[in-house]
Image: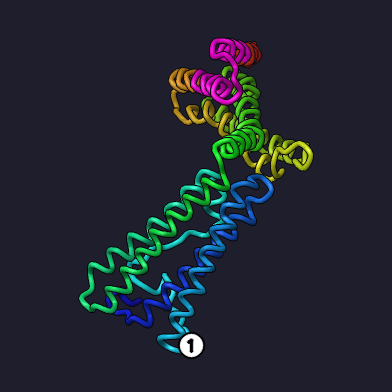
Amino acid sequence: MRSFSELSERDLLALAISSEEEDGRIYADFSHDLADEYPDSARVFADMAEEENEHRRRLIDLFVERFGQHIPLVRRQDVRGWVQRRPAWQVRAQGIDAVRRRVQEMEQDAGRFYQKAAGNVTDAAIRRLLGDLAAAELAHENTASQIQRDRLPPEARSAEDVGAHRRLILQIVQPGLVGLMDGSVSTLAPVFAAAFATHDPHKAFLVGMAASLGAGISMGFAEALADDGKLSGRGTPLLRGLACGLMTVAGGIGHTLPFLIADFVTATIISVLMVVVELATIAWIQWKYMDTPPLSAMAKVMLGGALVLATGILIGSG
């Protein structure tokens, strides 16, 4: 891997060409991936991809004029200290806001890198070229901002943000909440029944683990098979199933792990405290994402949890 200072003017121009091409393809990937759910933002990124392609064509024309037809392959990953770009799918998985931030950062990072590099060289030709590239990247950033103002007015962006929040609720929060409630509440009875029937923390732990894992698998499959998401807009079955299954396991394991403690009384007290934490978390999620009044959410969840807990203790003590 070569350092930036070792690159010739020819290599620098080739590097600029490959960088512009890669950024343009990233913008195009964003546009393609977002077209169905965020059409306005997709058009923004499509315009930016075309801008990058125009810059690439201008750089190629300059390269051919100065150095001939053959453009050597010089990539960002071949240069020490160059700004690395994550794959588009990794950023896309974090949501529309992450994509918007990444696009802005791409332009800012490239401009800063060119400016820094220009200050580290003494050759007048290379310094001039790096300065020109820095100015071009700063111009790209201004162009990107203008495109977003034209293509994505506040009302369109607000509508997309509302849609993104709705998809988060339907695809992640809702199935996850169902799983957490099932795991936290439905496993209470068998765990505490086993604990009070045997007074053996280890046996209670085994029952809790079996109940938690079994419920997680069952709930995950049930959620995934219940709806393909095409008509309801609830997202892919795999994502919903994973969210529901994992949260079910998490809800059951929370009050199961304390029974790893050998002392029965200590393990039971800590487990009950974990139940309170789990139920409070459920109530908080309902208030935060489902607009449920906090007192109402807390009262309903605590009442249900207390009834199931009492049922398990009564059965185990009988």
Q: Residue furthest left?
A: 122
Q: Which residues are magenta?
A: 275-304
Does the rendering let one see residue 246? no
Horizontal side of 71 relative to 93 (left or right) equals left
Q: Is residue 9 above or below residue 80?
A: below
Horizontal side of 52 relative to 77 (left or right) equals right
User: For numbered disc 1, what is the local secondary structure?
Assistant: loop
Dot 1 corresponds to which residue? 70
Count of numbered marks: 1
193 and 28: which is toward the camera: 28
Quarter of image, res 227: top right
Name the colouring of the figure.
rainbow
Provide residue 206's location: percent of width, then percent of height: 58, 33
Quarter of image, res 261: top left
Quarter of image, res 242: top right
Say which quadrant the N terminus sits in.
Answer: bottom left
Say which quadrant the C terminus sits in.
Answer: top right
165 and 131: which is toward the camera: 131
Q: Is residue 95 above or below residue 275?
A: below
Provide residue 51's location: percent of width, then percent of height: 52, 63
Provide residue 70's location: percent of width, then percent of height: 48, 88
Q: Is residue 51 above or below residue 152?
A: below
Residue type at mark 1 is: His
Does the rendering let one see residue 49? yes
